[in-house]
Amino acid sequence: MLDVVFAMSMGFFLGMFLLLAATTVLSGVFLLRRPRPQRNWTPPVSVVIPAYNEGSRIGTCLESVFASGYPQLEVIVVDDGSTDQTREVAGRYPVTVLRQNHEGKVAALNAGIARARHDIVLTIDADTFLRKDTIREIVKPLADPTVGAVSGIANVHNNHSLLGAFQAVEYPYISWLREVFSSLFKVAPGICGALTAYRKAALVKAGGFRKDTVLEDFDISFHIAKAGYTIDTARRAIATTVVPASLGGLFRQRTRWLKGSMQCVLAHRDVFAKKRLPMNYILAGQIFWFVYSFFALPLMLFHIAYWLPANSATFLDLGWYLFRWFSLAGVAYMLYMMPSWGVNWVYIFGVLAGLLSSAFYLFSLRRYGAVGWRSLLAVFFFFPYTLVMSVFMVGGVLSFFASKGKGTFIS
C-alpha cells in the first residue's frame, strides 16, 4: 500500500514539474524574443459593464473609466435585475443604462455588446477599477486586424486579508501564463474575465458568449480562436479587481472555475482531433488539474500523517515539522537532508515544483507591480493555500459529476 501511495505521489509531482518545466522553457523563449512594436492607436471604444447588485462599487468603476480621458468612449452598464441602487448610481454618470431581468452575466454581456456602437468592445466587471492608461494600452494590439481579443492584467484590490494576500499572488501568475502563451501561440488559456477588449466582429463570428458553460471567459477564448482570430495580452493594461473575501465565496468561485473548465474541455474536445497543439496543451492541462484535484489532497494528508509520529516527540519538534510542511522552509530542509535521506524522486520532483512555482510567483508579482510584504509572506506560506484549493477543487469535481456536466451538451 505504501509503495502505491508513493508511486502516485511521484506521478503527481512529476506532472506538476513537467507543467512548470514547460512554463519555464516557454517563459525563457518569450523573454528572449524582441518585443513587438505597437502603434499608438485610439479607436472609438464601447465599454460594457455587466452589473448585479454592485451599487457600492459601480460608481468607483465608472470613475476609473472616465478618469482615463480616453477619446470617443461609449459606456454601457447592463443592470442584471439588481435589487439595490446599481441602476440609480450608474445613472448619475454619462452612460447608457440597460436593464434586464436577472438572467446572468452572459446575457448581460451579450445585451451590452449588441447595443455597442463601436467595433472595439471593452468588457469590465463592475468591481474592477482601471489605471489611467489601461484603456489606451489594451486596445493597442487590436490595431492588428487578425487579433480578436486582448486580455488585461487583473491584480487583487482587496489584498489586505489573509485570503486576499494569497489570491494577490495567484492572479499575477495566471496573467503571466496568459501573456506568455498568447504571445508565442496567439491563443491563451482563457481570457481575463474582469478586463478584456474584443473586436466586435470576432465576437459575432464566434457566436457571442454562450450559456452552456459556467466559465464563459474560458469558453469564448476557444470560440474566437476557432473563428480564425488570435488572442493577445496587454501587460501594461492593469486594473485591480475585488476577489472573494470569505471561504464560502472563494469555494463557490473555484467550484465554478473547475466545473466550467471541464465543461469547456468536453465542448471543445474536437481540437484534439485537429491536432492544434497549443490548444491541445491547454485542454490537457485542465484535464491534469481535474484528476490532480481528486487525488492530491488525500495524498498530501497521508504524507503529513505518515511523518508526523517521527516529528512530534516535543511541541518544539511538532512546531518545526508543521512549519516546514506549510512554508518554503520545507523545500530548503529537504535539500539540506537529501544527502542523508538519499535520492528519492518524490522529494526531487516536489522540491523542483516548489522552487519553480515560487520563482514564477515572485517574477509575476514584480512584472505586474503587485509586490508587497503581504504578497512576499504569502509566497513563503503558500502551501496551506494550495491545500485549501485542493479541497475546493474536489468540490468542483463533485459538482461536475453531480450535475452530470449540466451546462454542456450532456443530458
Image: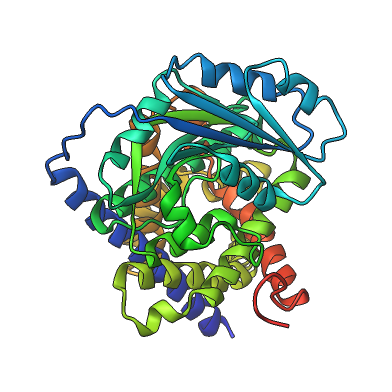
Q: What percent of the width, then of the height, locates residue 100?
A: 78, 43
Image quarter in which the C terminus is found: bottom right
Q: Quadrant of residue 400?
A: bottom right
Q: Nearer the viewer, residue 187 or 66?
A: 66
Q: Quadrant of residue 88?
A: top right
**Would residue 313 be seen by someone viewing this image from the given angle?**
no
- Residue pictured at 41% horizontal, 70% vertical: 15
Q: What percent of the width, then of the height, locates residue 224?
A: 42, 60
Q: Nearer the viewer, residue 46 or 359?
A: 46
Looking at the rendered structure, the number of numbered marks drawn on it comes to: 0
- Residue pictured at 55% horizontal, 77% vertical: 266
Q: What percent of the width, then of the height, locates residue 249?
A: 74, 44
Eyeballing the image, is 274 above or below 165? below
**Would residue 274 be seen by someone viewing this image from the given angle?**
yes
Q: What colour scheme governs how the chains and residues are painted in the rendered image of this protein?
A: rainbow
Q: Nearer the viewer, residue 15 or 202?
A: 202
Image quarter in which the N terminus is found: bottom right
- Residue pictured at 46% horizontal, 50% vertical: 191
Eyeballing the image, is 156 above or below 10? above
Left-right relation of 297 to 399: left
- Residue pictured at 61% horizontal, 23% vertical: 61
| Residue situated furthest right in the rendering | 83
Q: Quadrant of residue 37?
A: top left
Q: What percent of the width, then of the height, locates residue 216?
A: 59, 57
Q: Nearer the viewer, residue 212 or 121?
A: 121
